[in-house]
Image (cartoon, rainbow, N blue to C red):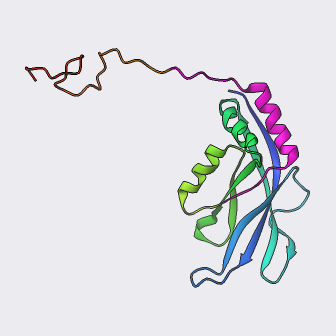
Amino acid sequence: MTEISREVGVVLRRRVIDNPWIDHMWSPVTVLDDVPATAPWTVLSQEADATLYYAGPATIDLFSTDTANYRDNLADGAPRIWIALRRQDGGAELELTKVTADPTEGEALFESGTDVIGTVPMSPDIASWVAAFVDEFHVEHVFHKRKRDGTSDDRRRGEDPSGGRRDDA
């Protein structure tokens, strides 16, 4: 399995919301093509109800076994990057846990129910990098339907191979 990685920077927004249970909401804003020389959790801009933060660096990993997923993401016309953040020890601070270009992996991130998950548009530079990886390593796998041979253990008890009932069952 071939793997390559690329470091990127992640920008988040903390927005004040009117809700009786929570006072703010986090959401990813963008993935930067390169990691800037900025300290993680630096405030980039601040408005009355929203603050933009440079959350820090993250790594996008590509695996040759997942090229079909990357290809599907690129073919969508608006490729996305999935970003996952997790609250540290139940507190208010977040840590970047995953940045991925794989839509299957990205959708699976939503299953935790507690992490902050979001998508952002994939930049043209990152899309070109992913496309070059797919072009180099994608292998089309042909689906072969398995034929039953009548000796399978998954037959119900009491049936003969021709599908009828046996008298001794």
Instruction: Decide: is 130 above or below 53.
Output: above
Q: Quadrant of residue 104?
A: top right
Q: Position of residue 41 (x, y in %)?
A: 80, 66
Magenta span of residues: 118-144
Let me know if residue 14 is in the magenta part.
no
Q: How many labels were placed on the picture?
A: 0
Relative depth, front residue between 36 and 121: 121
Let me know if residue 126 is in the magenta part.
yes
Q: Position of residue 108 (x, y in %)?
A: 57, 49
Q: Which residue shows up at 80% across the image and 50% down it?
A: 122
Image quadrant where one finds the N terminus: top right
Relative depth, front residue between 39 and 116: 116
Image quadrant where one finds the C terminus: top left
Toward the right, the furthest residue is 37
Q: Position of residue 31 (x, y in %)?
A: 81, 55
Q: Which residue shows up at 68% across the image and 43% down it?
A: 102
Q: Position of residue 13 (x, y in %)?
A: 77, 69
Instruction: Decide: is 1 above or below 83.
Output: above
Q: Which residue shows up at 83% across the image and 32% down it?
A: 132
Instruction: Decide: is 72 above or below 148.
Output: below
Task: Describe residue 69's horizontal placement relative to residue 57 as left or right.
Answer: left
